[in-house]
Image (cartoon, grey):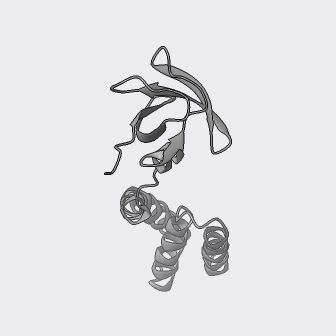
Amino acid sequence: MLKWWIFISIIALVIDALTSNFFFICFTIGGLAAILVNFLGLPPISQSIMFCIVSIASLIFIIPYVKRVHKRDMGQTAPLEDKYIGKTIVLDQDMSHNTIMMQVNGIYWTLKGTGEPMAKGDRVVIIGVEGNKLLVRKEEKEE
């Protein structure tokens, strides 16, 4: 039975190394526990029970821990839209009804004006994102 526990442990370790999700490492730990019970001279049924108990306990404790640590280390990825905030663009048409459709960096966006009316040629600053609209305001003129 020792050969089977070694085989199960190695296969689980290899699968875990290939998938890198720490799921199969729990079965490797269970296999190592079964190997230990085998060395103590206990029968195969005891080895199997130990394998199951340790594997399940490992799943219960290791997987949530790995997810928590992985989520903490991952960091937050900013949405693509947030990269537009602060960017200055020149309007290619009048903003008569407070919204226009305009191409920004190769993507057509609905621009929604905040504040005073804007005309073609005005420089505007993107100040936020509201759903699928870019919020813009007229650029402050430096004197």
Q: Residue at left 47%, top 63%? A: 55
Tell me where residue 78 appears, x and y as whole percent. Answer: 45, 51
User: Looking at the image, which is closer to me, 107 or 13?
Assistant: 107
Task: State which quadrant residue 10 falls in.
Answer: bottom right
Seen from this angle, which residue lies furthest top? 97
- Above or below residue 64? Residue 122 is above
User: Looking at the image, which is closer to me, 91 or 127?
Assistant: 91
User: Looking at the image, which is closer to me, 115 or 10?
Assistant: 115
Q: Using residue 13 as the reference point, say whether residue 111 is left or right of it.
A: left
Q: Residue at left 36%, top 27%? A: 114
Task: State which quadrant residue 138 falls in.
Answer: top left
Seen from this angle, which residue lies furthest bottom? 39
User: Looking at the image, which is closer to me, 108 or 24?
Assistant: 108
- Above or below residue 130? Residue 4 is below
Seen from this angle, which residue lies furthest front? 143
Mark count: 0
Tell me where residue 6 appears, x and y as whole percent. Answer: 62, 79
Tell me where residue 118 appears, x and y as whole percent. Answer: 45, 26
Quadrant position of the N terminus in the picture? bottom right
Q: Residue at left 45%, top 66%? A: 50
